[in-house]
Image: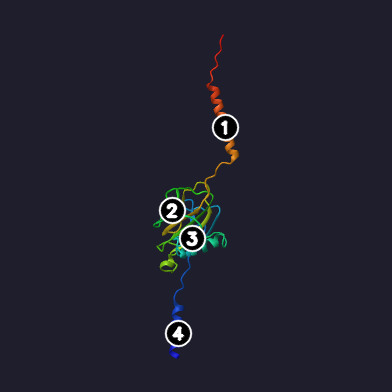
Amino acid sequence: MRKLFISMMLAGAAFVAQPAQAALPLCGAGDISPTSPTFTAFNAFDCSGFVSGQAFADSAASKTILQGLLDDLFGVGAKDAATISYTKLSGLNGAPSVDFTASPFNTSLNGMTLLGFHFGAGKGSPGDGSGLKGQAATSSVLYYFDAGTDLNTVFLKYKASSDVVLFSTNPPAIPEAATWAMMIAGFGAVGYAMRRRRKVTVSFA
C-alpha cells in the first residue's frame, strides 16, 4: 500500500512539473487589414476565436466548432451552423492576403462582411508557440467587420493560412428609386435637346 501511495505521489509531482501549455491567442482588430503592412483598422469590427481545430470542413465535428464561434459572435442560436451557407477557398498555403475578386468568390467586399479563416500548425500561425500539438495547433476564427466600399483584398497578420470562407457581404450600393428617376429625366432632357439641335429651320423670302 505504501509503495502504491509513493508511486502515485511521484506521478502527481511529475505531472505538476510539466510546463503548462499556453492558450491560443484571442482574435483582435489587428489580425486583418484592408491595407498591406503597416496595417490599418476597419471602422466596425468584431471577431470570435481562435479555437482549436477546423471549423469549415462540413463534418459534424467542424459544425460543432463553427456553432460555438457563431454563438459567441452573434448570440446563442442567432445563426445555425447546420444551415448557414458560405463559399470556401482551400489551399492558401500560408498566403499573406486574399483577393476576393478572384475565383471562387468573384466579388468585392462591401459593408458588413463575415469571413472565416482556418490556420494550419506551421510557423507563425496562431497555434505556433502555444505548446499545443498536432490537430490542436490548427485553429479557426470568424471576423465580422465593415469592409467599406468595393474592398478587393484582405491582408493577414498570421502565417500558415489554410482556408478562407466568405459567409456574407453586402452588394454594391444601388441607387434609390428617386435617384433613378432623376437619372432617367436627365437622359430624356439631353435627348430632347439633341433632337432640337438637329432640326434645320428653312425660311423662304
What count of labels does the image hold?
4
Identity of the residue furthest to the front in this view: 83
Mark nearest the camera among 3 and 1 is 1
Looking at the rendered image, the quarter that the C terminus falls into is top right
Disc 2/disc 4 C-alpha distance (Å): 51 Å
Identify which residue is drawn at 54% across, 24% down: 195
Disc 2 marks which amino acid?
Answer: Ser
> Mark 4 = which residue?
8
Disc 4 marks which amino acid?
Answer: Met
> Mark 3 = which residue?
141
Nearest to N terminus: mark 3 or mark 2 = 2
Disc 2/disc 1 C-alpha distance (Å): 43 Å
Nearest to N terminus: mark 3 or mark 1 = 3
Q: Which mark is residue 186?
A: 1
Neighbour class for label 4 at 10 Å: few (<14), some, many (≥20)? few
Q: Which mark is residue 139?
A: none
> Element type at marker 4?
helix
The image shows residue 8, relative to residue 202, as above or below, that is: below
